[in-house]
Structures are given as structure tokens and as C-alpha cells.
Image (spheres, rainbow, N blue to C red):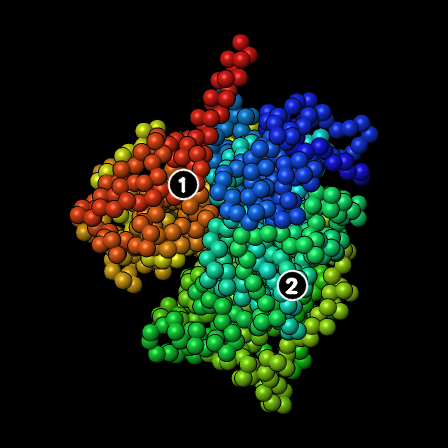
Amino acid sequence: MTATARPPGGTPPADGHEDEKTSKDEKDGLAMTDRGRPAGRDTEWYDLPAFAAAAGIALDAVPYSGRVLLESLLRDGEPEQAATLGKRLAAGEPPEMEMPFRPARVLVQDYTGIPLLVDLAALRDRVSRPGRVAPALPVDVVVDHSVQTDWAGRPDALALNEALEWKRNQERYAFLKWAESAFDGLRVIPPGHGIVHQVNLERLATVVAQGPGGLLRPDTVIGTDSHTTMVNGIGVLGWGVGGLEAETLMLGLAQPIRVPRIVGVRLTGAIRPGVSPTDVALTLTRRLREENVRGLMLEFTGPGVAALTAADRCTVANMAPEYGAMSAFFPVDEETLRYLRQTGRAESDVRLVSEYCRAQGLFADPSSEPRFGRVIDVDLSAVETSLAGPSRPDQRISLAELPDSLRASTSRPPRTAQGLSDGDIVIASITSCTSTSNPKAMLAAGLLARRAVELGLTVPAHVRTSLSPGSRAVTRYLRDAGLLPYLEQLGFHVTGYGCMTCNGGSGPLADGIGATVEREGLTVCAVLSGNRNFEARVHAQVRAGYLASPALVVALALQGHVRADLETEPLGTDGDGAPVYLRDLWPDSADISALEREHVTPEVFAAEAADPARTDPADNWAALPAPDSDVFPWDETSTYIRPPAYASPATDPRPLTGARALLALGDDVSTDHISPVGTVPPGSAAGRYLRERGVRDFNSYGSRRGNHEVMARGTFSNPRLVNGLLGDGDGGGDTLHLPSGERLPVYEAAQRYAATGTPLVVLAGRSYGMGSSRDWAAKGPWLLGVRAVLAESFERIHRSNLCAMGILPLLLPEGTSWRSLGLTGREEFDLAVDLVRETTVVEVRADAVTFDARADVHSAGEWAVLRAGGTMPYLIDRIERELTSAREEAR
């Protein structure tokens, strides 16, 4: 394929198709005439170096991720804006500007994708021309979140879990199949193929994308999952957003982004033998959290980058949400090309990536580092074997610090009951795309398991073990290397190809364990090779969670508890009674590399290369019945798929006067605390709702995200949520109804407030909305009547989600908290909000306390959505205005 560069600064139409036109900005030498593809040429692109030269931009000084943004602006017909941004970035200055961003594609998983598609189906009901509601760019839906670890530690676990998955989710999957046929440009990758971000790496990402008319561009992606950043590791710029933002992108609107500062993370040194990619990621997570990179774009640079494989880089990039960054970019280089070949990409495609990126200045030049306004230096040789826990991914600890970490998290003396003790590990899971996408990490786990079996070590009965690879290729190379049987002997049988334990789908604890934990109030632990360990995320009965490399997960499973120092205390004894230490089992780096060269080959990925959606002969997808209609036939009795109540809110929002605080929360409230996760408890409001409708298998909250009735009842019901209205350490899904002073479940209190027309606010501390991107953490509060959140700071995606739902995010005065302002949460609140004038400063009166809050709204587009009452009514109004205008022009 021959690739031909365009002159600088071209302007294609907004829909991405080419025609003969001239740029709207014909000045300063930045414009060009777009006359389609030259005769006899296969492809073309916008010539970034030529544009930079014409605009006086030192392109070599611009960070590589910034160059991708410049190319996007050129394609969007904004050469002047591109010139301004390029000059600022080349000088290392803060961008301080807003820009439209249109990715090459959108990527979603089923937990976020089904609510998104339910919204689009509802939009089709509400507009006069349903066909107008359709994706304007390619969309992939990877079904990976619904499978749960109901069965584990047995050879038939995979078959049993997949059978249960299909039985529980047939209605949801039929809806997805309807969507695939109803919406052009939408592809569903059915269950059983892997985790969305690993499928993206191994199969979907092209690094260079080809658009309409053969126009080449960088492959960029927006995903409805916070860990979309994982693909940054192979030079594909992308980040996570809420489903509501993705809806606007799918309908052809650009995402308005306020370009953040691009910070360089300069890596030096090399990883020491025995140190895993997970150790690097956990070390960086702690360091970068301390550096406060919240909402920033990071780019990795320096000589240490060459010491990381592409898979290592992806492990680091995966955890960008954990250190708070918008993205964590590694530029394209020779290692990227090697990874593309290793995972079975066609050589012609790899050559195209090389040719395009080199010509566009997007191929990393190790001899010339870009200019960053801020650089964070990290020495890879200083990284040591690590864990993170017991309740946040940035709590990086050494092996020696493990026992004290648990003791520091509880104020009472250790307890033992019925053979189970505080600190016992009850879940040990090799799970998550974070690590199962990395062959070195997985082969290390297999080698450690082989050595443990050879020495006669076993896993205690109270530990529930599982292996959930991110793709079928992992199982293939572990089996080919002869390591899978050893993992299975220790109970690490494959349980499914999905997020599973990492996303809270961990299934029941071993027989009798859950009852003992509940009765005695024990603090038991989970250890997993995932990316999040918020309290009760992995399992409602497991308070402490530790993140670790797959090999360390196996080692800790053998030990069975976290009360010992793995550096000095044995994991067990061999057949002769001699102690066996971690160092006796730890695999040699040379052995890992040899196995990877021999067994991680293009052939193991080839089975899914042609079409990842249709390669499994046991797939039930083809036989699944689904509606055949442009408009979805809603079933009013369904407990899975319901038309959303927030699609058409009142056009005249109630004023924020006489408001009450629904909850008063502290720091680090995650979306797990806000939006329900895991199984639906039978005694909960959501459980009662389902029982009243004859449901016996409640499934998970995630699987019910297409039903707003279930999700509203589960919002703020997390048993670990602490609500300051009830006092320190209290909450558990309850709140104080005011002015009655009654303690009620949050949902019941919200219903009482709704009956009296009382608007609601939420008070919060720092980092409100950290964790997963789920837009239900904004949708649920909106359904409860919340119209504003006053917090010390917001996490990036959740802030956007609040705006998208018409909930105003307000920042408390800098350096204050709601407590330091003298608030108790029992006041009546009057907020002087003017959405029409887009007032950034909002006066808040709360009884005797008055202060100014700042609206954390980042763009004119967000103000427009807030005025409309949310994304859905905004889109309905916009589509109808477009259709009316088209009809008038036709006359």
C-alpha cells in the first residue's frame, strides 16, 4: 500500500468524508485545497511536518501525544487552533485551550455499552426520524463483564460459568444482537473472547487507521471504560469517558476537551531481574498520585522506555485512572512494531504503521526528547517487588511491609474463629487485562506454580483460586509451554474469559467461609492481579484487597494469609519437611524470556485474527433470537431492559433553593461507593423490587444497568459508605431524612424528598468519583433527585458524567472542606445558579453559613448540556432542530 502525504492544514467535511473544498481559514499559509485522493494513489494523509513548518512550529519539541491532537485539529478544519496549540506545546507552556476531538472509533464493554445502547434506542423512540440516531463512526462492543466466577478451583469451571452466563443474560444479549443489526457501524464481540482492553490490544487496535476515502490518520479511541488508556502503551491515544459522552460522539458530535498540560515521565535505568511489570505499574501509581497528575496527559520518555516491552508499557498505561491521569502515552517505536508482528498483524499493516508514523513525526526518536513544561523522573532500577493495599491501588508496599499494612487498617486485636483468622486470604485470582495481557507476567506465574508443585506445596482449603485470562491466546501459550497443568493443580483453573473477579464478579467464598466471616466480623483478604482493590469491591464480605503480579498471587495463595513477611518467612514445607521460601520458587528472567520467544507467537493469536466475533465454534451468538426492527420493541415487564426515565426530564429545572443534603461524604469516595456493584442483596431495595416481580436469580447490579429502577434503588447503598450525616464511621446505605430526623435507606429518603419537591445536593471531600468510569454513578444520583455535588475535588471522568446528567459539580473554596466551613449537612441550601449566564462563581447559603463555590464546568458544550437538563434531552432537541432545518431547506 502506497501512502501519500497531503499538503498542510486540510479541512474535510465534519462527517469525515472528502469533497472538493477550501479551508475556511485561508490565512498565514495554514490552509490548503482539498481535492480528494491523487489519481493512482491508495492512501493519503494530512502532512503534519509540512503544516508545522508552515506554521513556525518546532515539531520535534512537541510531545508525541500533542502531535496526535494537532493532526486531529487539522482533520477537523481548525488549522489556526492547531497552530496555537502546537506553538504552546513546543514551548512547554500550558495549552490553556479547548478543542474538539473526534476519535477514529469508540470502544465499549457490555456493562457500560448496554445502558448506552438503551439510551440510543430510547432516542429513536423520541425523534421524528429514528434512522437519524445511528453511529457516525465505528463502534465495537466487547461482552466481557457479565461472566462471573460462580465456579472455581475445578476443571469444569469454565463450562459451568459460561452456561450460567448465557442463562442469566440471554435477554441482555438479545438486545445487543438487535443493536448490532439495527445500527450500522456497530459490531458486537460476543461473550467468551476476552477482556475489552486486551481484545483491543491484540485484535482491534491498528495504530494507524484508515477512514473514508482512504484517508490515513492515527488510530485514536474513546472508550466507556476508564482503562481504555491501556492501548496508549502501543501508541494509540485514547481515554475513558462516560456512556453519555460516548453517545454524543457516536452521533457525530465532537468531544469538547480542555487540553490539559502534557507532563513528561522520564524513565531511566532498567528493570532488575525478578521484578515484574506489575511492580513497575504499582510503583508508578503511588509515585504519580503523590505528584498529583489528576486530569493531566502523561507521556513516557527517556532511555528507560526502551527497557519496557510493549506489554509492559500497556500494564503501566492501564493504570492511568489509578494515578488519576487522563492518558499515559508511549509513542510508537520499533517495540510497537515488534508487538504488532507478535500478535499476528499482517506485515503490510505493520509496514504501513512504520511508514506513516515516520513520515508524520509520530515515530519516537530516542536521540531527541520533546519539551515538557514539567518532567517527573523515575529510575526503573529502583523498583522492587511490590504489592498495593489493603484498600487503594496507590497504597504501594514492599513484601516486608505486608503484615503491618493489614494491622494498620484495623484498630482491634487480631481474631480467630472456626479455623479462620483476620488476614487469611479467601480469594486469590489471576485476573484482569492489566496483567493477563503480559506474557512475561503470565509465564512467570506458570513457572512459579510448576516449581511449587514439584516441591509438594498446596493451597489451603479456605483460599478460592481462579484464573480469568483476558484472551484465549493466553490459555494457548500457557498450555503450549506446559505450564497450565501446574496452575490447575494449585486450583488456578480457567474460569472464564472476562473481567470476573477484577470487576467484583468473584462469586461465593469457599464453603462455610462467608458465614464465618459474616458472623464473626473477620477481616479477610483478597489478592488479585487486577487494578482496583477498593474495600468490598472484589467481594462484599472481603474488606482488605491486595494487588500483585500473577506470580505473587500464586505465592500468596500458597501461603494462605498476609500476616507473614514473604522475604524472610517460608510459604510452606516440601516433601522432606524443609521450609520453602519465595526465593526458592521465583522464576529466572532468562527462562521467562526463552519461553516467550518459543511459545508466544503469531500463531497463538491467529485463531481470532480474522474476526474475533465469530471464531468460537461453541458460540451461541448465531442461534440467539433477537428482534428485527429499526425501533426496539420494549417489554414493560422486563427487569433488564427498560426505557430510561431520564430521557425527557422537565424542560424547566426546579430552582436549587430549599435543597437538602442527601449525604455528607468524606475523601476518596469511588464510583463503587456511589453506583452499586456486585450481586444484588436479597434484602436490599433493589432485591425487593426484583422479588416483587417474580425474579429468583438477581444476577449482578452490572447486568441490571439497562433498568433504571434497579439502579436507582442501589445507588449509595454500598455497606462500606460512610455518611457524615449519621456520624463518623456510620452509613451502610442509610441517611438522615430532614427535617424529620429519621434514619432511612437512601432510596426511601430520596422518595420522601421527591414527594415534597425538595431538590438534593451531596457534600463530599477530595477525589470524589475516583475509580471506574461508570455513568450510573451520575445517573443514579440524578434519579434520586440530586442536582448538585459540592466537593473539594472531582476525578476527571466522574466530573464529566455529572455534567452529562445535568448535575452541577461545584468546588468548595480552595483549602476548605464542608466541615471546616462549619457545615453539618443538616442545613437548608440555597444555590445561586444561573445556567443561562454560565456563572462560574455560585453563592451558596446554608442557614448561617455563606460561601462561594466554583462551577467545575470545562466547556461551552457542558454548559449547554446542563441547561438542557442532561445529554439525552440535549440530543433530542438538537436532532429535532436539525431535522426541522433540513425539512425547511427541502421546501
Q: Quadrant of residue 610?
A: top right
Q: Nearer the viewer, residue 433 or 696?
A: 433
The local secondary structure at tag 2 comes to: helix
Q: Residue at x 76, y 59 (%)?
A: 601
- Say what amino acid the circle numbered 2 marks: Gly
- Residue annotated with mark 1: 857
Split into 4 quadrants, where in the image is the N terminus?
top right
The local secondary structure at tag 1 comes to: loop
Give x and y (percent) for residue 517: 39, 70
Q: Residue at x 34, y 47 (%)?
A: 811
Give x and y (percent) for residue 565: 50, 80
Residue 741 in view, yes or no: yes
Residue 137 in view, yes or no: no
Give x and y (percent) for residue 233: 63, 54
Local packing at callout 2 (Cα closer than 10 Å; few below 14, some 14-19, many 20+) is: some
- Residue annotated with mark 2: 304
Q: Quadrant of residue 385?
A: bottom right
